[in-house]
Image (spheres, rainbow, N blue to C red):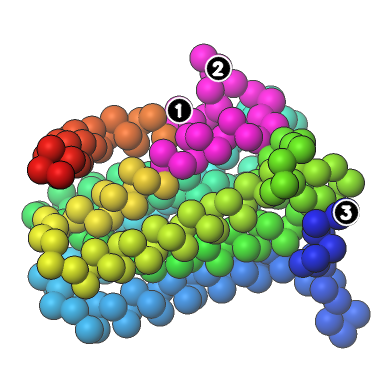
Amino acid sequence: MNNTLLIVSLPFEPVVFGIKLNIHLILEYLAFFIGFRYYVLLRKNSADVISSNNRLSIIIGAVFGALFLSRVVAFFENPVAHIQEDWLYNLNNKTIMGGLFGGLLGVELAKKVIGEKHSSGDLFTLPIILGIIIGRIGCFLAGIKEFTYGKETTLFTGMDLGDGIQRHPIALYEVVFLMVLFIIIRRFQKSNITFKNGDLFKLFMVSYFSLRFCIEFLKPNSYYTLGLSSIQILCLICLVYYYKFILQGITYVRKKLYVL
């Protein structure tokens, strides 16, 4: 049975007034809009220790860092194929992983320039997760037109994404994971557990980059370095970047298990 028919035929390309809509592009812009509005709402209802001017500088740093590295990482997913394309194609081609890590580096650079010492990530965490969820739904609806589909599989999760082959619906895997992570972080915020400023953002980055490292093995990648895709290498770089936080987390869990 074709599981996709239970949801929608993929790729999903609705036609409105005779115009075929790019549903993925629409949801991508919607993700930015809703994510930013959610961030504004959270900042309005929180006691932000960072001034408005510094917040603006941090956001600008994040945007430029994300724009740059999202395209660099996307290029190295398959540089041979990308060299054959024109500059406009390469300019539009991007990956969320490069965007996240590039945004992180852009934020850190901006903070150094303006002399901001406080961690700025926690306020962005839930809006980013929400935005990625919306964007990944768009990726799923695009079927095999976006390189977010998986290898052929015989598992019950396999779906026809538009080419008649039962594949891992990787975008949906991410949506489910991110929804659970969103709920966990939200509950942490409301709990009595004391977190250092910035820890929840680190938790998101470590969790999501760990997931993406694993999930890349389910994608039909064609270009590898040392047996890993460019995204997997970036994931390892990110995990090394946060190695102190990871070690602290392992120590905390071990203490809790020891008490039990």
Above-or-below relation of 103 to 76: below
Could you say where residue 59 lies in the image, as x and y percent from the top left?
Answer: 31, 63
Q: Which residue is mark 3?
A: 1
Helix or strand or loop: what does disc 3 sit on? loop
Q: Earlier in the sequence, mark 1 or mark 3?
A: 3
Q: Which of the marked residues, 2 or 3, is nearer the chain's N terminus?
A: 3
| Mark 1 or 3, closer to the camera | 3
Query: What number is the disc on residue 233?
Result: 1
Q: Quadrant of residue 195?
A: bottom left
Which residue is outermost to the top? 226
Which quadrant of the rendered structure holds the C terminus?
top left
**What's the distance in space between the residues labelled 2 and 1, CA to CA?**
10 Å
- Of the 4 image quadrants, the one containing the N terminus is bottom right
Query: Can residue 114 be seen by looking at this rendering?
Result: no
In-front residue for pair 81/246: 246
**Residue at numbered disc 2:** 227
Residue 107 drawn at (x, y percent): 27, 53
Q: Is residue 213 magenta?
A: yes
Label 2 and label 3: CA atoms lie apart by: 35 Å
Q: Residue at x 43, y 71 (%)?
A: 35
Location of residue 71 in the rendering, given as x and y in whole percent from the top left corner: 53, 43
The residue drawn where x is 49% and y is 40% is 212
Q: Which residues are magenta?
A: 209-234
Residue type at mark 3 is Met
Disc 1 residue type (three-letter): Ile
Q: Is residue 101 magenta?
A: no
